[in-house]
Image (tube, rainbow, N blue to C red):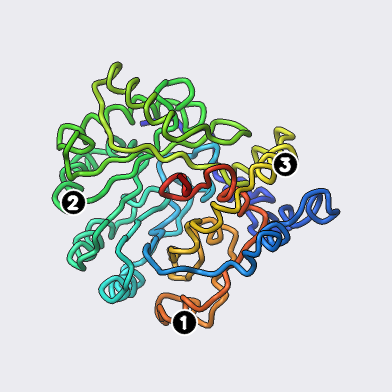
């Protein structure tokens, strides 16, 4: 089991465990004094305010903040000490929506979603609903964390789950620095287990994609180049194969915001994001085609807004009153963290958003 580097912000009773305090930081300082334009001002310049949803394609459900890792960059502030877990009652409400949605993708996330005690039952029921792309976001180490999880690769294969896994680098040092001591070795073992089942192999319908997040206060490099490098390195060193690499920009919230402030990199990082703003990326950011559902059933424009407790600007606030038509007729909630999704080639849970 990987050693945990730290506790969650919530467990430490840190100021930044308070979402309202995070929003205040993002709204004040260099944005309040006009040194940098707010995100609303920026997208107004390119005639994209208000930001509105397009056709709903993805239901992203966070089934709990509990995790067996405590990663430096985690925007969820997940960890073993987080006890927020979606109940079966709320899952049943989600299942009713899944059966009737026009969305084609179901995206389960956490924490480590596999740690929810109802996870397998939920996957079994949701897999019957005819969703075209059923994603589970796995941190990989959960597969090797406990014997009860050892058969997860077989379970994923049985239900044709699209596995999206965190893997910040092909070297032990950089991976363990970000995600905790021992994470790299467990991740390699888990990837090998997935490969044995056919995941990630050329021509396989069992899709395995990896996710890269930068280790420091900088933006990710070119996604295609990094994918090529990681594929070559993992194949040569460990005989591991995967399909695609998603390069995701770290957003300045939760533990990454804590890191930025502690390392005195916050203002420099926000300058980087603003200077890399790309209006073309705004057209395809994930909040325009996604609804995010929290562990307790509340609705958000994206997973990041969920963590900042910025709910959808709609009469429909909870899964138990879900109405897709009403939700499609809303303005998307924005703040300065949104620069992270519109910098460079853009960033979403599916990687870059522009060609």
* Point 51% across, 26% down: residue: 177
Decide if residue 72 is on the left or right side of residue 157: right
Asked whether disc 1 touches disc 2, contact meaning CB atoms under 8 Å apart, the reply is no
The residue beneath circle 1 is: 326
Q: Secondary structure at mark 3?
A: helix
The residue beneath circle 2 is: 160
- Decide: few, some or many residues near mark 2? Use Cα within 10 Å; few <14, some 14-19, many ≥20: some
Q: Quadrant of the N terminus?
A: top left
* Point 47% across, 30% down: residue: 180
Asked whether disc 1 touches disc 3, contact meaning CB atoms under 8 Å apart, the reply is no
Mark 1 or 3, nearer chain start: 3
Q: Real-space Cα distance between discs 3 and 2? A: 42 Å
Q: Give the answer, above or below, for where 265 lies relative to 97.
A: above
- Coordinates of residue 278 in the picture (x, y in percent): 60, 48
Mark 1 or 2, nearer chain start: 2
Q: Which mark is residue 271?
A: 3
Near-viewer residue (17 or 246): 246
Q: Give the answer, above or below, for where 22 lies relative to 243.
A: below
Q: Secondary structure at mark 1?
A: helix
Q: Real-space Cα distance between discs 1 and 2? A: 32 Å
Mark in the foreground, 3 or 2 = 3
Q: Is residue 322 visible?
A: no
Near-viewer residue (339 or 261): 339
Q: Quadrant of the C terminus?
A: top left
Q: Real-space Cα distance between discs 1 and 3? A: 36 Å
């Amino acid at each position: 089991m990987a050693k945990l580097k730290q506790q969650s912000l919530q467990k430490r009773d840190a100021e930044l465990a308070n979402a309202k305090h995070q929003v205040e930081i993002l709204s004040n300082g260099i944005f309040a004094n006009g040194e940098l334009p707010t995100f609303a001002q920026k997208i107004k310049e390119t005639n994209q305010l208000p930001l509105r949803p397009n056709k709903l394609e993805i239901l992203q459900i966070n089934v709990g903040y509990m995790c067996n890792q405590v990663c430096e960059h985690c925007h969820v502030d997940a960890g073993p000490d987080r006890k927020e877990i979606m109940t079966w009652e709320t899952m049943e409400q989600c299942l009713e929506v899944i059966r009737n949605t026009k969305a084609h993708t179901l995206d389960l996330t956490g924490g480590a979603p596999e740690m929810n005690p109802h996870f397998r039952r939920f996957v079994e029921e949701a897999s019957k609903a005819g969703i075209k792309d059923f994603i589970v976001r796995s941190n990989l180490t959960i597969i090797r964390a406990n014997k009860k999880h050892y058969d997860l690769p077989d379970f994923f294969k049985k239900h044709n789950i699209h596995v999206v896994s965190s893997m910040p680098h092909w070297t032990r040092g950089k991976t363990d620095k970000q995600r905790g001591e021992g994470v790299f070795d467990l991740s390699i073992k888990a990837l090998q287990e997935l490969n044995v089942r056919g995941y990630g192999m050329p021509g396989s319908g069992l899709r395995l994609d990896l996710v890269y997040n930068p280790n420091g206060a900088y933006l990710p490099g070119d996604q295609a180049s990094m994918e090529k490098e990681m594929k070559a390195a993992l194949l040569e060193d460990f005989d591991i194969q995967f399909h695609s690499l998603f390069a995701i920009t770290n957003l300045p919230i939760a533990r990454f915001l804590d890191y930025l402030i502690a390392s005195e990199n916050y203002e420099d990082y926000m300058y980087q994001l603003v200077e890399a703003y790309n209006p073309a990326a705004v057209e395809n950011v994930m909040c325009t085609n996604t609804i995010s559902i929290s562990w307790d059933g509340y609705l958000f424009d994206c997973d990041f807004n969920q963590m900042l407790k910025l709910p959808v600007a709609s009469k429909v606030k909870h899964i138990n009153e879900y109405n897709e038509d009403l939700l499609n007729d809303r303005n998307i909630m924005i703040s300065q963290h949104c620069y992270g999704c519109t910098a460079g080639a853009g960033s979403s849970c599916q990687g870059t958003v522009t060609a």
